[in-house]
Image: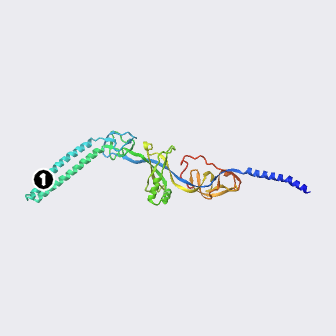
Amino acid sequence: MKKFTVLIIVLICPSLFLACSRKQSKVAASASEVLVTVVAPKDVPVVVESVATLDGLVNATITPRVSGHIISQDYKEGTAVKKGDPLFQIDPRPFEQALAQAKATLEKAKATQLKADQDQKRALELFSRKVTSEQERDTALQAAAASKGDTEADQAAVKSAELNLEYTRVTAPIDGVAGFATAQVGDLVGPSSGPLTTISQVDPIKAVVTAGEQQMTDFVTRYPDPAKRAERLRTFEFELILGNGAVYPQKGKFYALDRNVDVKTGSIRFEVTFPNPGNILRPGQFGRTRVIADTKKGALLVPEEAVTELQGNYQVAVVGDDDKVSIRPVKVGERFGGMWEITEGLKPGERVIVQGAQKVPQGAAVTAKLWTPPAQTPAGTAADKPQQP
């Protein structure tokens, strides 16, 4: 009887072990495969990207100072000019005549003053010898003083005539690129007729950028001391992304901050200067500036595809030590390129599902494999301005 029982046990046990093995194999085969990333704190750059408009560092509007007819245009439109280079010539003949007349009047005044000075000298001498009266002496003194005043007035008239004659030669006040002429040879121009052209200093050239009031407030809060704030601003290196997507090879430096915040848009303007050898960049061009404004210390980042949004709430799927899925609500912070900062709900070292979370429910057993991020784009091109959700 005992031998029979033992025989039955021997025959049944292998069947039981085989059944258990098949069951475990079936469970293992049914576990979904997911790709996970291990959460780890990182220091990440805060990259701020903004729309920019290029403008000349100095834009000089060339307006005639005297009235007359243009007799020549002495520069080529759209080319570089140096300070003092001739741009236009206004007919100088009327001003040459005015100068000649002013000089003649001055010579006449000098002759009159010479006679008045001589009369004054004689009047003083005669009065000292009591030959003439005080009235005669005073009359001579007044005549000499009046003659001196006339001479000085005529000297000023000569200088004014010389200046007007000089103004007929319109020259460049700065180095830069001269624009198209708005008046042609033969046109009658004057101070009230409008500008003749514009010259823009383009090396360096400035980019006018608009920043949000909150960004400015945050920056000032971090650097309340004006000296330290200015020192920090000097360390910024700006990149310029041109309209065709190319990155301009020269780095820019902070130049100036506007005096006020725009009450309509809640933004403030600031300017960045870029070296511009060869005048490659021109005023009016649009682009984008990019700068590393700060560094986020110890941020917990996960890929954007790992975060699910549902009616304003955010959640991620976490794989526990038992290889089971836990759907967990989280709070998100800023975006850094293709990554999203998690401010609450995750701890360093936890595994978050990046791909495959849609096919696994709460508590499901999974087979986790490490997710490999895609190839990195060129430095900074994927990093957008951090955005709050």
Task: Give the secondary structure at mark 1.
Answer: helix
Q: Which residue is mark 1?
A: 119
| Residue 196 figure quarter | top left
Residue visible at 16% across and 49% down in the picture: 112
Is 34 on the left or on the right of 205, as rendered?
Answer: right
Which quadrant is home to the C terminus?
bottom right
Q: Nearer the viewer, residue 374 or 73?
A: 374
Residue visible at 88% across and 54% down in the picture: 8
Residue visible at 26% across and 41% down in the picture: 93
Could you tell me residue 98's position as x and y percent? 24, 44
- Number of labels in the image equals 1
Q: Nearer the viewer, residue 308 or 342?
A: 342
| Residue 70 figure quarter | top left
Which quadrant is home to the N terminus?
bottom right
Q: Is residue 70 above or below residue 149?
A: above
**Residue 232 seen anywhere in this rendered image of the structure:** yes
Is 5 on the left or on the right of 145, as rendered?
Answer: right
Residue visible at 90% across and 55% down in the picture: 3
Could you tell me residue 376's position as x and y percent? 58, 47
Could you tell me residue 290's position as x and y percent? 50, 50
Q: Is residue 243 above or below residue 312?
A: above
Q: Mark 1 belongs to which amino acid?
A: Asp
How is the protein colored in the picture? rainbow
